[in-house]
Image: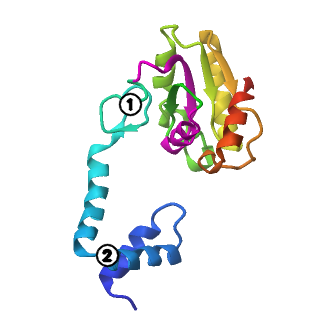
Amino acid sequence: MNAEPLDRLIEQFARLNGIGRKSAARLAYQVLGMEKEDARAFAQAILDAQEKIHRCRVCQNLTEDEVCAICDDPGRDAGMICVVESPRDVSAFEHTREYKGHYHVLHGLISPAEGIGPDQLPVQALLDRLRDGSVHEVIMATNPNVEGEATAMYLARLIKPLGVQTTRLAYGLPVNGSLEYIDDVTLFRAFEGRGEM
């Protein structure tokens, strides 16, 4: 019974992962309550993000530049690469301020049920980074669920012949948990207690 533009706005919000129909309606009504200038700025921020943000050519994290600030930072340990599922996981690690190495963002996990195989992930880009011998450790920091474990094991099998130590975050993280929701202390302890795969 809503006006058509409102229904379309609700539908667009409902397309976002984790947003149900009620939450989508709540967000749509919030947008309608904005001043026109604020609504335009909101819409422009979405367009700018879509147009200006892309993957870092080195680590695949999201950036506005060709190479992200983490990869471009000479103070970070280039000999360590932490493999994560998404850019949100990079943010979670960076929030702890404890990890000083580099990252590699997969933008997904191997999941045959969803039709996602290794070819859909930037696996080759990771292997290319390891070939020059400057990396001494790759830390598997995928979520501790079936897909995360399968992806970590697959990558470990590819990396070991290259002579690079492959470790996994310690099991202190909840099964089927998501790294972006883990508190700083738990995440740091899991990182410190990682073991070889």
Q: Quadrant of residue 141?
A: top right
Camera-side residue: 146 or 119?
Answer: 146
Residue that badge 1 annotates: 69
Seen as rendered, the residue at the extreme bottom is 1
Left/right placement of residue 160 relative to residue 60 reads: right
Point out the tag, 1 or 2, that comes first from the N-terminus: 2
Residue placed at 55% from the left, 39% from the top?
A: 85
- Residue stretch in magenta: 73-97
Residue 197's spot in the image, x, y percent?
73, 23
Residue 187's spot in the image, x, y percent?
67, 39
Residue 96's spot in the image, x, y percent?
59, 38
Element type at mark 1: loop
Above or below residue 195? Residue 170 is: below
Residue type indicated by callout 1: Ala
Tell me, yes or no, whether the highlighted magenta stretch contains residue 80.
yes
The way the protein has been coloured in the rendering is: rainbow
Residue type indicated by callout 2: Met
Camera-side residue: 48 or 123?
Answer: 48
Above or below residue 7? Residue 156 is: above
Asked whether the residues under the numbered discs 1 and 2 touch, taking CB atoms below 8 Å apart as contact, a structural biologist would say no
Residue that badge 2 annotates: 34
For the residues marked 1 and 2, what is the alpha-carbon distance in whole angstroms?
34 Å
Residue placed at 56% from the left, 34% from the top?
A: 97
Left/right placement of residue 51 relative to residue 74 reads: left
Seen as rendered, the residue at the extreme right is 171
Camera-side residue: 184 or 92?
Answer: 184
Residue 4's spot in the image, x, y percent?
32, 83
